Amino acid sequence: MDPVALFQQVAGSVPAYRAFLAENSIDPEKIRTFQDFARLPMTTKETYTRRHSLPDLCRDGVIGDIVAVSSGSTGEPSFWPRSAADEQVIAARFEEVFRDSFAARERRTLAVVCFALGTWVGGLFTVDCCRHLAGRGYPITVVAPGTDRREILRVLPELAPHFDQVVLLGYPPFLKNIIDTEDLPWHRWNVKLVTAGEVFSEEWRTLVAARAGIEDPVRGIASLYGTADAGVLGNETPLSVEIRRFLSARPAAARELFGESRLPTLVQYDPEVRFFEEHQGTLLFSGDNGVPLIRYHIADEGGLVTYDEMLAFVRGHGFEPAARDPERPFVYVFGRSHFTVSYYGANVFPENIAIGLEQPEISGRVTGKFVLEVSEDADRDRHLTVTVELMPGEKPTEEIGQLAGESILTQLLRLNSEFAHYVPAARQAPFIRLRESGDPDYFPPGAKHRYTR
């Protein structure tokens, strides 16, 4: 993508962006080089999209033919129109996953959309993109039970036996919970997963693959990096998954590359349709979406690595990936920093805790959901507290609490050097609270789970 050409197009066709430039005393005719482009002010929800009417944010002031709604972390709704043309571009990311990871050109595929249906971006958008693939000649049939477990259990046994493979598309903890708790013949259905919305560990990928009967975790589970603002921005590929799995076992190398003790989502993106920039450890992107965006600051923590830089890095650490394509740049995404807790000056990330609960000695007794918080006792001493959801039928026991606490501490010390060095040894062991499955205070059924308080 030529960012300057995109800028000129948006400046000429989007009323809100013209007004934004005028407010900042910028003459669009003078933006001719990339250096000019890089000096443009960033756009954000606060400085741009929330300050202008919805039609003015769209091309030629015309709202697209479908609108998604997001509330983000603030709860205030944002509206994101798009058109069929926008979906065609984003369907290419789904096509890459279905073609290169799932071999869906050659297999009759049932795509089961388990994202929430309605005004939210995930469900209907995924349905539309999968149908675009069917229109491109892929033997794909789509069914959309959404997050209604009863519907999932009704349609899967009836439809799955008629297909070569079943692809479940949804939010990672929801898919894991369905696989863990429903007595279905997953191993007979050649299951694949497409996830979005949350960073997960490679231990999670291995664990869920084993439970779902997925023989090859590298090509059987793929994560999408998507936003309500612009749809799918990038996707995991066999190459990116291979590299991530290599780095997950080498925290020092991962920290050298990403600058953090936690492992980010690592995807590849198409620079012909998305232009990314890095700004002080966060990401900006530009793209011609339903609401065209220029230097939009999405507030995701992360960064960029070119294809050549990435291959040189992993080869320098003795790893030669089996997959070589696609030869496209990488973007890595941690998510937003306010989902961490601070304990003795160390940032403790939900990802660190999740890996502890995904170890073999404890994973069969817990769902993987937890709430991380720092609490104070009567003496005002602070404690790292993890409230853990048990598998259905499990009851809280001292043994489970001890296993969970030991596993979490082991992984914290392995992965988080800040924690290991900042927190006094006597205060490092987390306090574990066990709750039965579906606990209304911590794990209410149907609600999108938050891992910190």
Image: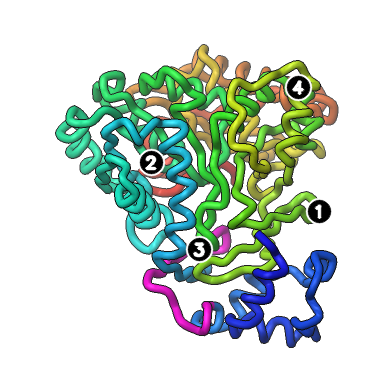
Q: Nearer the viewer, mark 1 or mark 4?
A: 4
Range covered by the magenta-colored residues: 58-74
Q: Which mark is residue 71?
A: 3
The first of marks 4 and 3 along the sequence is 3
The first of marks 2 and 4 along the sequence is 2
Residue topped by disc 4: 315
Q: Could you tell me if the residues under marks 3 and 2 are in contact, i.e. CB atoms within 8 Å?
A: no
Q: Which mark is residue 169?
A: 2
Q: Residue 108 location, x and y as percent?
A: 26, 34
Between the residue at mark 1 and the residue at mark 4, the CA separation in whole angstroms equals: 27 Å
Between the residue at mark 3 and the residue at mark 1, the CA separation in whole angstroms equals: 25 Å
Residue placed most toward the observer, 86 or 203: 86
Q: Residue 37 location, x and y as percent?
A: 78, 68
Between the residue at mark 3 and the residue at mark 2, the CA separation in whole angstroms equals: 21 Å
Amino acid at pointer 2: Leu
Q: Which mark is residue 280?
A: 1
SS state under label 4 = helix
Residue at the spot x=39%, y=25% of the render?
391
> Could you say which quadrant of the image residue 7 lies in?
bottom right
Amino acid at pointer 1: Gln
